[in-house]
Image: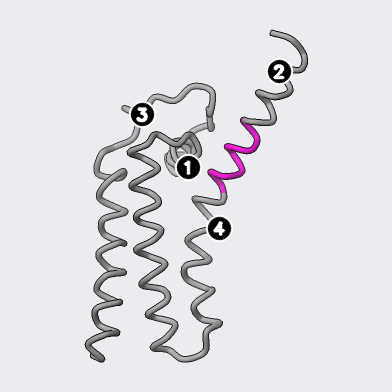
Amino acid sequence: MGKATTNQTNRRSLVIKLLAYAHRYLFPNLVIFLPILSGSKETALFYMGIGLVLLALYNLIGYTLRWKHIFCSYQNAYHQKMTPEHTNWNFIKKSDAYGIPLFFGGLGLIIIIRHFLNL
């Protein structure tokens, strides 16, 4: 393996790890705090519901399509070293891969429906 190939691999691993950190820490915070800037409580909850549904879909699609940064995000959640070069998808619990996104996606749908019913 040449020096250029090693540099490309290191750069790719760094990008995957940065995306994993963004997935784990930045995206959920954006879903929570960006809607607060919208002004009214009702509008903020509605946008938060949309954000929860989108984040849940992103997680489910990422797990299904085996995106490496999603795998690394789960490694980070399990307090393991991130290994974008070596992914063992059997390592991730199915309850985490499907249950957590479905819970938050369902919560987001409840918030959206509540907004449209004006409850």
Magenta region: which residues?
Answer: 13-21
Q: CA distance from mark 2 to mark 3?
A: 24 Å
Q: CA distance from mark 1 to mark 2?
A: 23 Å
Q: Earlier in the sequence, mark 1 or mark 3?
A: 1
Q: Main secondary structure of the magenta part?
A: helix
Cβ atoms at labels 1 and 4 below 8 Å apart: no
Residue under pointer 4: 26
Q: Nearer the viewer, residue 106 or 50?
A: 50
Residue under pointer 1: 73
Q: CA distance from mark 3 to mark 4?
A: 23 Å
Residue type at mark 2? Thr
Q: Quadrant of the C terminus?
A: bottom left
Within-10-Å neighbours for mark 1: few <14, some 14–19, many 20+: many
Q: Is residue 95 left or right of residue 8?
A: left
Where disc 4 sits, the SS reads helix
Please tell me which residue is depicted at 70% across the width and 24% down the height of the picture: 8
Q: Is residue 93 left or right of residue 77?
A: left
Please tell me which residue is depicted at 71% across the width and 18% down the height of the picture: 6
Determine which quarter of the picture holds residue 44.
bottom left
Q: Earlier in the sequence, mark 1 or mark 4?
A: 4
Residue under pointer 2: 6
Residue type at mark 4? Leu
Residue under pointer 3: 89
Residue type at mark 3? Trp
